[in-house]
Image (spheres, rainbow, N blue to C red):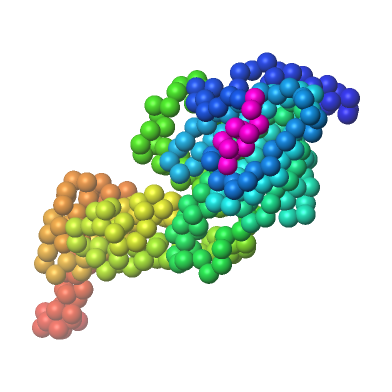
Amino acid sequence: MNAARSDSMSDLTAHVADQPLPLSKFHRLSSGDMAMIRRHSSATFGIAKPEIDLERRGATFHFVHNQFDLSRTSLHVLDYNCSDCAVRIDMQIQQFLLLQFSLRGEAELSQDGMMDRISPGQFKIIHGDSPLRGRLLPGYRSMILLVPRAALSAALAEQIGQQPKKPLIFEAACFGEDGRGAALASLCKTLCANLDTGGPAFMRGPVARRMEDLIISLILWSLPHNYTEEFERDETSAPYYVRRVERHIAQNAATALSFADLVAASGVSDRTLHYGFRKYRNTTPMASLKSVRLELARRALLEPAGRRVVDIAMDCGFPHLGKFAVDYRERFGERPSETLRRHLLMDRSSNAAPNLLCSEDWHKRR
């Protein structure tokens, strides 16, 4: 069993070695000058004085770095092309959260007193609160997702509805790509593969921003940090902005409300509001508004006070009578006119009975 797995991993490694370096269309640096590599790493990853050295003096290597920037986040592929010697690293990445995926070979990385050996199919969280030390073993190749800590903190504040009382701190842990970080790992690798085959056109403008928001959300929801328990505890309780919009709808359903109005009332972005309603209410903000309006209309039809269907529809925020009739029938199983007619018949019957009981004819018929 182990021999078979070893052969399989060897075949996979050989296959990866034959492949071109990912993100090759977005080349940043090729160099055999270690001093240049240190300066480049310092500028790219915000490291004050990175220590990067070969374990064996005189070993041959050729560093290659490819990089694609979304908006605030970025994807990197690094390869030292050093097949007969390990590379030692000692650095602290202060402004970013870094997720390091192994594409080929193995690395021994230590942070917070915990040493992890990562290989293909695994990734490690590297935070900026303590130094990172380790060895990139011969033939090692990695993909790195770099996310500004400020962007993560802003997303956290939006999610919990207030500024965090404590700094956001991630656990320096190692995960398999089929575990709790599976969706995040799959998204990063799919993005990388699409950039290699399709180019960056589809990643410009709002598409890139939405992709980045999704990546940041997956990091906050799937990776362990000091707010994880709060996230899990509140998972079934709708956040403040969902409840705020529900109150706004209840108070203003009969007025001309647009999605932009609901976003303004929520105090969060349109994407966050839509996600919140989907997750906690299994609907959308505008569908929730329509549901409240339909309930208002039904109550009005059961107590019409001489009004027609068209008057009630307009008063409850439905400018198009035909669409209102379709939505009403889908919700309540009958047309608005049927609800109104049934109420009028019941009203006439209840009014006729007392008159009959009080008439002289009734007494005569007794």
Quarter of the figure that contains the C terminus: bottom left
Q: Position of residue 315 (x, y in %)?
A: 16, 62
Q: Residue at x 59, y 46 (%)?
A: 47
Q: Position of residue 290 (x, y in %)?
A: 29, 55
Residue 39 quadrant: top right
Q: Residue furthest top?
A: 18
Q: Residue at x 35, y 51 (%)?
A: 270
Quarter of the figure that contains the N terminus: top right
Give the camera-side residue of 119 and 136: 136
Note whether residue 112 is visible: yes
Q: Residue at x 51, y 38 (%)?
A: 74
User: Which span of residues is magenta-colored?
Assistant: 32-42
Residue 88 drawn above or below residue 57:
below
Q: Residue at x 58, y 29 (%)?
A: 65
Q: Main secondary structure of the magenta part?
A: helix
Residue 294 quadrant: bottom left
